[in-house]
Every structure is written in structure tokens, then in C-alpha cells.
């Protein structure tokens, strides 16, 4: 992509990916082990956390970021990555600011991936027990080496978060349609402000006609 710099990315300027346990990542493919534990919904201002500001500095100087290894590797193997797609707008704008509005230059939280909880009625192959309660029994049998949430984890950001500047909200789970009450409230709140809302779902049967 001609206008895509070597290493930098617009995502840390405009996005946060919030997991069911409250941890926050610069995006969904960023290396989780690089992110400090205290970057989470309990932090008083996670979008201005020093690690997010450090990343923005690195991006501004077009310097290599270890956490972005997946994107750099994808570009070596296929000349394309989430970074190139998002930076170029190739797969849509996802509510990110335009270049004139400071895309990748001025920090402004416009785009959130928000996992409502880890409750799920499926166990898809590419998923894991942190993101689906249905994977618990298999994880236990296999001595899964990571910390597994004990029981249902509900993200406090759903109740307390500030959605006022958002342009794009992606609802995740678990299975977001199992969290009907929260989902309906979020959709009503966000769609009323003409924002883009997207729910990643494996689809479940429900009888609520207002969805
Ligand atoms: S370069 Fe890739 S991993 Fe890094 S913030 Fe951008 S999209 Fe995420």
C-alpha cells in the first residue's frame, strides 16, 4: 500500500479491544503478553494509560512495535495485514476519523471492541475458555495452562463506560445474543446516536422481538 508506513498503525490512536475479564488491548491481534496488567477497565483513564501513549509515540516515529508482530509477519507472507487494511481503509472506515480529522495523528477514541461477558453456548475450534464458558470442561481435562476465569465474567465497562465519542461499537462475547438485555440497551443507546454497531455472533435462538 503506497500510503502505508513501514511499521506504524492508526489503531492505538482510536481504538481499544476490551475483553470479558476487563483487560484492554490496543487491538484484537496485538500480542497480549506485551500489554501491562493494569491496562484494564479498573484504570481511571485506560485510553490515556502510559502504555497507550508509548505506543502512539512509537507509531508517530514509524518504529517497530513488538506487540504488532502478527501484522508485520502477515505482511511478509501475504503483503496484507489488519494494519494495512485498517490504515488504507480497504475494508471500510469502521468509524475511524478521516485524515483531515486526524486519523493516526490525534488521539480520539471512536472505535471499541467490547466483549459483554464470556458466556457462550458454543465451543468453536478457534475459540478458548477465556472467551467461552462452553470450553471449560475440555480445558480442565487438558490441564489448560492459562488462567481460566472461574465462572461467568461480566465486563464492568458495559455499565460504567463512556460511549459518548464512539462512532463504531463491535459487541463480542462469549455470545453477545445471550446477553440480550445489555445488548438491547447498548444497541438502542448507540443506534439512537447514528453510530455503527456490529455484533459478532454464532446466533442463538431467542424470543425477544425487540432485537
Ligand atoms: S499494527 Fe496490527 S497489531 Fe499493531 S495495533 Fe495495528 S492492527 Fe493492531
Image: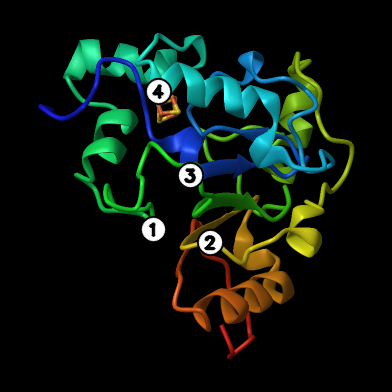
Q: Quarter containing ligand 1? A: top left
Classify mark 3: helix, strand or loop.
Answer: helix
What residue sits 81% from the left and 25% below the top?
140
Which numbered disc covers residue 197?
A: none
Label 4 with label 3: CB-CB less than 8 Å: no
Which numbered disc covers residue 14?
A: 3
Classify mark 4: helix, strand or loop.
Answer: helix
Residue 76 image offset from top left, x and y in percent: 22, 10
The foreground one among 14 and 40 is: 14
The part of the image, by quadrant, that contains residue 128 is top right
Q: Identify residue for label 1.
A: 95
Q: Identify residue for label 2.
A: 166
Quick check: 52 left or right of 142? left
Classify mark 2: helix, strand or loop.
Answer: loop
Q: CA distance from mark 2 to mark 1?
A: 8 Å
Residue at the farthest bottom position: 209
Earlier-in-chain disc, 3 versus 1: 3
Earlier-in-chain disc, 3 versus 2: 3
Residue 204 image offset from top left, x and y in percent: 57, 67
Quadrant (top left/top right/bottom left/bottom right) for the C terminus:
bottom right
Quick check: 16 left or right of 49? left
Q: CA distance from mark 4 to mark 3?
A: 14 Å
Earlier-in-chain disc, 4 versus 3: 3
Classify mark 1: helix, strand or loop.
Answer: loop
Q: CA distance from mark 2 to mark 4?
A: 23 Å
Please tell me whether mark 4 or mark 3 is closer to you in this view.
4
Amino acid at each position: 500500500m503506497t500510503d502505508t508506513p513501514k511499521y506504524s498503525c492508526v489503531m492505538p490512536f482510536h481504538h481499544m479491544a476490551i475483553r470479558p475479564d476487563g483487560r484492554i488491548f490496543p487491538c484484537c491481534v496485538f500480542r497480549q503478553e506485551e500489554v501491562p496488567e493494569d491496562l484494564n477497565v479498573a484504570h481511571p483513564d485506560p485510553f490515556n494509560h502510559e502504555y497507550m501513549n508509548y505506543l502512539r509515540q512509537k507509531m508517530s516515529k514509524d518504529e517497530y512495535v513488538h506487540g504488532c508482530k502478527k501484522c508485520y509477519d502477515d505482511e511478509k507472507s501475504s503483503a496484507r495485514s489488519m494494519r494495512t487494511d485498517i490504515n488504507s481503509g480497504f475494508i471500510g472506515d469502521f468509524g475511524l476519523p478521516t485524515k483531515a480529522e486526524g486519523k493516526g495523528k490525534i488521539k480520539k477514541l471512536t472505535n471499541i471492541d467490547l466483549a459483554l461477558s464470556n458466556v457462550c453456548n458454543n465451543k468453536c475450534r478457534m475459540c478458548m475458555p477465556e472467551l467461552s464458558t462452553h470450553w471449560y470442561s475440555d480445558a480442565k481435562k487438558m490441564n489448560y495452562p492459562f488462567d481460566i476465569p472461574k465462572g461467568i465474567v461480566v465486563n464492568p465497562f458495559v455499565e460504567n463506560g463512556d460511549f459518548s465519542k464512539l462512532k463504531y461499537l463491535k459487541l463480542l462475547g462469549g455470545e453477545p445474543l445471550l446477553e440480550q438485555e445489555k445488548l438491547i440497551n447498548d444497541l438502542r443507546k448507540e443506534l439512537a446516536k447514528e453510530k455503527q454497531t456490529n455484533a459478532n455472533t454464532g446466533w442463538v435462538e431467542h424470543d425477544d422481538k425487540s432485537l
